[in-house]
Amino acid sequence: MKPSRLTTSSQTWTAVDAYTISHLHPPSKKNSAVLLDALTQSRDEGLPDIASYPVIAKFYALQCRAMRVKHALEIGTLGAYTSIFLATENPGMQITTIEVDPHHYKVAQQNVAHAGVLEQVTAKLGAALDVLPELAKEIESGGKPRLGFVYIDADKSNNWKYVDVVIPMCESGAVIFVDNIVRGGDLVDRAKKDASTAGSRRVVEMVGKDDRLDGVVLQTVGEKSYDGILMAVVR
Ligand SMILES: C[S@@+](CC[C@H](N)C(=O)[O-])C[C@H]1O[C@@H](n2cnc3c(N)ncnc32)[C@H](O)[C@@H]1O
């Protein structure tokens, strides 16, 4: 039988990412050094190696630019790699990012300061469901613009709750991305009942039923293997 393209190895996916990013975001780019510093510093501080990879972070940064987003939200900061990518690629944009782990938050603040984007990136410490009502008040009072872009990348079991809570903070046409939806295919493996997979299924099923949103899931391969992102647009 002819080998299916699906058997292409993850080594090939990684090589393709390395090739494309080396041309489309080479070390000579203005922000390449600070992005690398953020990863190195995060690793040296003992943070887990679970930051979004460069292709995905740049994809989000370009989405924000194309949509002329004024205010972006990230749930799950880690060492602020993606926040720094978003900020340095979109100098006029504000970013709010929420992190529950005090050590991750501290490292993120250091990385944001080192990258020179402290004025653009507001990092908030706490569990996202506790912090989001504070942000909602800031937006309602006009202290911050409505959200044009949301990136959900934290505890997967709360994926749907986060989407549900952020919708009223969004402008019409805002885009919400939820990471790690496909999970190597676990999404459709009924034997997989762990909380993260259940959280991925719930957000897909709830977005499909919600008249406030229109969504799609994009499967991805790359240096972090086979996964996918949910994209939902706020009506
Ligand atoms: C996959 S990492 C985020 C990576 C980051 N978005 C990036 O692209 O560099 C997930 C982060 O979410 C944080 N987290 C987990 N549960 C959370 C919660 N309830 N509220 C806020 N952050 C949470 C974890 O501590 C971890 O730092």
Image: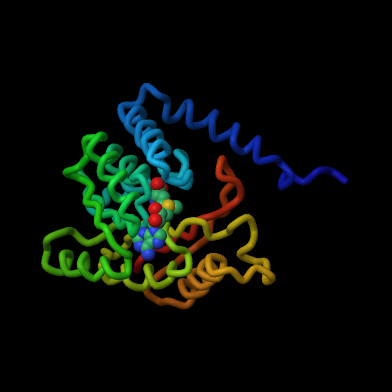
Residue extending furthest right?
A: 1
In this rendering, the answer to whether 161 lies above or below 156 is below
Q: Nearer the viewer, residue 44 or 216?
A: 44
In this rendering, the answer to whether 230 lies above or below 85 is below
Using residue 192 as the reference point, say whether residue 205 is left or right of it: left
Q: Nearer the viewer, residue 232 or 14?
A: 14
For the question of whether residue 176 can be seen, the reply is no
Identify the residue at horizontal 44%, vertical 30% (top origin).
Answer: 24
In this rendering, the answer to whether 160 lies above or below 99 is below
The percent coordinates of residue 178 (x first, y second) are 44, 59
Rendered image coloring scheme:
rainbow
Using residue 132 as the reference point, say whether residue 219 is left or right of it: right
The percent coordinates of residue 14 (x first, y second) are 59, 36
Q: Tell me where residue 35 sits by quadrant.
A: top left
Identify the residue at horizontal 46%, vertical 65% (top origin).
Answer: 215
Identify the residue at horizontal 17%, vertical 69% (top origin).
Answer: 137
The percent coordinates of residue 107 (x first, y second) are 31, 44
Q: Tell me where residue 8 sits by quadrant.
A: top right
Q: Nearer the viewer, residue 118 or 12?
A: 118
Q: Quadrant of ligand 1?
A: bottom left
Q: Quadrant of the C terminus?
A: bottom left
Using residue 146 as the reference point, say whether residue 38 is left or right of it: right
The percent coordinates of residue 116 (x first, y second) are 21, 35
For the question of whether residue 100 can be seen, the reply is yes
Identify the residue at horizontal 67%, vertical 67% (top origin).
Answer: 189
Residue extending furthest top?
A: 28
- Counting every numbered tag in the picture gives 0
